[in-house]
Image: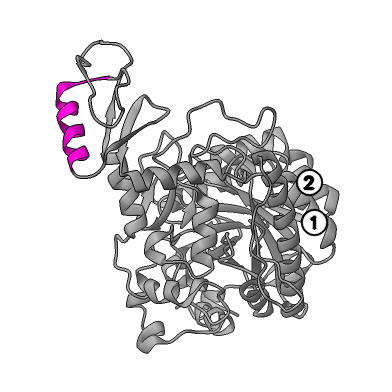
């Protein structure tokens, strides 16, 4: 018996604690963390987003792309992704010792999501209990799950999103709906489903949103025994006491994405772990710089601040004199016919004087000003695109049809594959995207982590089950 009567749930034919390890790619949750989480009786989650594979000596195989075209590099990426995820699942399953359950997590908007998911499930039959999937509207998830006889756990941020998925596809495979993950867009780390109708600066109480999700599930005939997994902002179970055994909500499980980052089994580098201990409230930023186009939350480190500053050095333009655009831009564009407002010409000249001498066009008819060094990095990263997303705003890649979004590549964004691979493999934490949930500041406040203590996953799960 856990905190306040928290009871195991039946999942995949066995009893497990209703505690889910959040899957974090790239390589921020792997076989060590997920296998240990399952061994402790919970649901461990292997990230199948470009996971690490290993050579004969057990060393991580660097994901190097040698092909000359984006399409060919995309095929290389798919091969790396399948090999890595299969190896991670096999190792996690072995570590679990038959306890708990092993899920895999994929992003529907990652490049090659369907062939990667199918390739992994084909080679890991009997090891994977379920697939969690978000970052988009994964209508085909239930169909794929049925083919491989695994549970599917869609990640949504609203009742409306679940209703759309259910009406279009999921109602055909109701028996394999393992759970519905409610990922709170204002609390969760990584990408989320904040809609254009919602204000990123005005967080909403998750309880009414989860109740609305349960009401929708009931309307569609989904049993209360199918859990809703609360993801985002979960730290102490005692903070969620009124959610447990609550008839309004039905069966509830809890997902932990941020807390497992600071364990012995966590694969992230030590410098990243150390940085988590120093975070203060407000140090995690909900932003929209990701090339996916989704909102996401990450530590507001120098990498993110640089993206903020880059977007601040931005002015609208037109190709002809019109409206307030009455003067020609004479910096950053080298004689091209760009018309801007007089006040924006003054701003552009000031930025140029500070060293931001190069103007780069955006898809929104604006120009951002960057240094020559920054320009070179942006252009190289765009040229080196390996197709890690289904649609990439930064490089204008698309993983099907004519392989282009048809839009101008956006210099206000960044190569997400490059930065996530770098930080996961000991790259500088100040120069890379560092995902974290908005409760990460509690590492510094929670006495469990005092005096530099780092728990094992088993110690963490045991601690969580006490309510702390």
Residue of label 1: 121
Above or below 114: residue 150? below
Name the image quarter holding the C terminus: bottom left
Residue at x 48%, y 39% (from the top left corner): 394
Q: Quadrant of residue 220?
A: top right
| Residue 144, numbered label | 2
Q: Could you tell me residue 265's position as x and y percent? A: 58, 79
Q: Is disc 2 placed on a helix, strand or loop? A: helix
Looking at the picture, tell me which residue is in the foreground, 5 or 203: 203
Magenta segment range? 339-353
Q: Is disc 1 placed on a helix, strand or loop? A: helix
- Left or right of 282: which side holds 460? right
- Left or right of 403: which side holds 289? left
Q: Quadrant of residue 356?
A: top left
Above or below 139: residue 255? below
Q: How is the image coloured?
A: one colour
Q: Could you tell me residue 392's position as x and y percent? A: 54, 39
Residue at x 44%, y 71% (from the top left corner): 272
Above or below 253: residue 456? below
């Amino acid at each position: 018996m856990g905190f306040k009567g928290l009871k195991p749930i039946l999942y995949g034919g066995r009893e497990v604690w209703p505690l889910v390890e959040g899957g974090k790619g790239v390589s921020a949750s792997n076989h060590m963390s997920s296998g240990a989480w399952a061994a402790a009786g919970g649901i461990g989650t292997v990230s199948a987003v470009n996971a690490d594979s290993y050579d004969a000596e057990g060393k991580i195989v660097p994901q190097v792309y040698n092909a000359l075209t984006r399409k060919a590099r995309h095929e290389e990426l798919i091969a790396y992704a399948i090999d890595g995820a299969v190896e991670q699942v096999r190792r996690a399953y072995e570590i679990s010792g038959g306890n708990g359950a092993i899920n895999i997590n994929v992003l529907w908007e990652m490049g090659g999501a369907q062939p990667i998911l199918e390739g992994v499930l084909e080679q890991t039959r009997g090891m994977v209990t379920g697939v969690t999937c978000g970052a988009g509207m994964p209508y085909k998830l239930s169909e794929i799950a049925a083919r491989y006889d695994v549970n599917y756990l869609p990640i949504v941020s609203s009742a409306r999103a679940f209703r759309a998925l259910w009406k279009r596809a999921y109602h055909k495979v109701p028996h394999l709906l393992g759970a519905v993950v409610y990922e709170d867009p204002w609390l969760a780390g990584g990408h989320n489903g904040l809609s254009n109708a919602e204000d990123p600066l005005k967080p909403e109480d998750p309880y009414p949103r989860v109740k609305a999700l349960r009401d929708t599930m009931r309307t569609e005939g989904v049993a209360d025994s199918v859990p809703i997994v609360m993801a985002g902002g979960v730290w102490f179970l005692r903070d969620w006491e009124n959610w447990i055994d609550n008839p309004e909500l039905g069966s509830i499980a809890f997902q932990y994405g941020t807390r497992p980052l600071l364990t012995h089994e966590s694969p992230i580098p030590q410098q990243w772990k150390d940085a988590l201990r120093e975070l203060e409230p407000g140090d995690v930023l909900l932003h929209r710089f990701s090339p996916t186009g989704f909102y996401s939350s990450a530590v507001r480190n120098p990498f993110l601040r640089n993206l903020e500053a880059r977007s601040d050095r931005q002015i609208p333009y037109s190709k002809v004199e019109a409206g307030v655009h009455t003067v020609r831009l004479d910096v950053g564009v080298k004689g091209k016919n760009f018309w801007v407002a007089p006040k924006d010409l003054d701003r552009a000249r000031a930025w140029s004087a500070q060293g931001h001498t190069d103007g780069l066009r955006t898809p929104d008819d604006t120009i951002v000003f960057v240094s020559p060094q920054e320009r070179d990095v942006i252009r190289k990263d765009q040229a080196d695109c390996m197709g890690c997303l289904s649609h990439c705003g930064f490089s204008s890649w698309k993983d099907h049809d004519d392989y282009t979004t048809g839009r101008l590549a956006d210099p206000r964004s960044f190569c997400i594959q490059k930065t996530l691979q770098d930080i996961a493999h000991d790259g500088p934490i100040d120069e890379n995207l560092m995902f974290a949930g908005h409760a990460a500041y509690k590492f510094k406040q929670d006495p469990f982590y005092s005096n530099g203590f780092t728990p094992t996953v088993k110690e963490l799960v045991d601690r969580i089950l006490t309510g702390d």
